Amino acid sequence: MSSQSIDLSIVVPCYGSGSWLAELVDQLHQALHASSLDYEIILINDASVDDTWQAIASLADADERVRGVDLLFNTGQYRATMCGLQQATGELVVTMDDDLQQSPADIPAIIQPLLDDPTLDCVMASIRGRRDGLVRRIGSSLMSGLFRLTYGKPRGLKVSSFRAMRRRLVEAISQFDTARPNINPLVLQSTARINNVEVDHHPRAGGRSGYGIFRLGRLMLDNVLSVSTLPLKAVSVIGLLSALVSVGLGIFYFVRWYGGFINEPGFATIVLLLLFFGGLTLLSIGLLGEYLIRIMDEVRRRPWFVVRQRAGESEATSGDDS
């Protein structure tokens, strides 16, 4: 990260959004025009196949407050955001999506609690009136429950990708050396001093969400398995309870057989037990396989990202390229 510091950095990972990035940047300027904050806008092109990088480069050439980073290969939203966090120089850092569903006009409200309370580390937007589909809403509810179980997230706290963080928190989560940097879990592991600010949900500027059912399922697995051993512990507990139940059933059937109450084989019982323990065994093997995949990812040490080129006044600024 650069040693030169400003007041506020806005980090936006971009993919397939070239046609409306100019509107996004214009709204950011309008939202921060009345403030006295010295700010920068960092747009990360996640190897988008459209004209997103051309749009970013044009905006950076026209405005010294805009910086652009073009990634060599597609990394996904989390890694692209981590790239932006590593380029940011602000004492406060805001992350947001590029689809305009999160309004730049809400940034002053999100950063104000951090300005008012120096002990607060992070403010996350609580989205009201969500316009997501049923599958996305169900997925968000399941994710929230998993976060409570896995990371001890307070019940009333809402998490989202629209967040403001202090530099000390940005530096803390950047130190996690993991192949799959899931930002909200890292934030929850790093600090408990998090507040919510309610904001409205807006229509997408264009395109469609890349989070379908399969990708949401993988995202939930990553959020839990990449930084938690809770599923392994849960399977261990289930295995222990199953063993105790098996011993109890064995004693029960032995007593009934010894007392002469069993005169024919318990076919249904045998089938049910075989199905239960066979399913539990396959679940355990599959879970171990998921952890092995993640261990291999960590061992291979694939970089989070590789920077192809930069745009803006800080093209020559030092920063991590992987």
Image (tube, grey):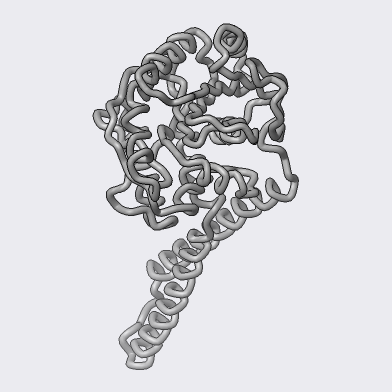
Q: Position of residue 114 (x, y in %)?
A: 38, 40
Q: Quadrant of residue 202?
A: top left
Q: Position of residue 81 (x, y in %)?
A: 55, 32
Residue at 50 percent across and 14 percent down: it is: 17
Q: Position of residue 119 (x, y in %)?
A: 39, 50
Decide which of 25, 159 is in the foreground and name it.
Answer: 25
Decide which of 250, 49 is in the foreground and name it.
Answer: 49
Q: Quadrant of residue 37?
A: top left
Left or right, 201 with reference to 96: left
Decide which of 30, 133 is in the foreground and name it.
Answer: 30
Residue at 45 percent across and 50 percent down: it is: 188
Placement of 143 over or under 161, stated as above or below: below
Placement of 175 over or under 203, stated as above or below: below
Q: Is residue 191 visible?
A: yes
Left or right, 98 with reference to 87: left
Quadrant containing the C terminus is: top right
Q: Position of residue 40 (x, y in %)?
A: 52, 23
Placement of 298 over or under 129, stated as above or below: below
Residue at 44 percent across and 56 percent down: it is: 150
Q: Residue most toward the left?
A: 129
Quadrant containing the N terminus is: top right
Decide which of 67, 98 is in the foreground and name it.
Answer: 67
Placement of 130 over or under 265, stated as above or below: above
Q: Is residue 139 visible?
A: no
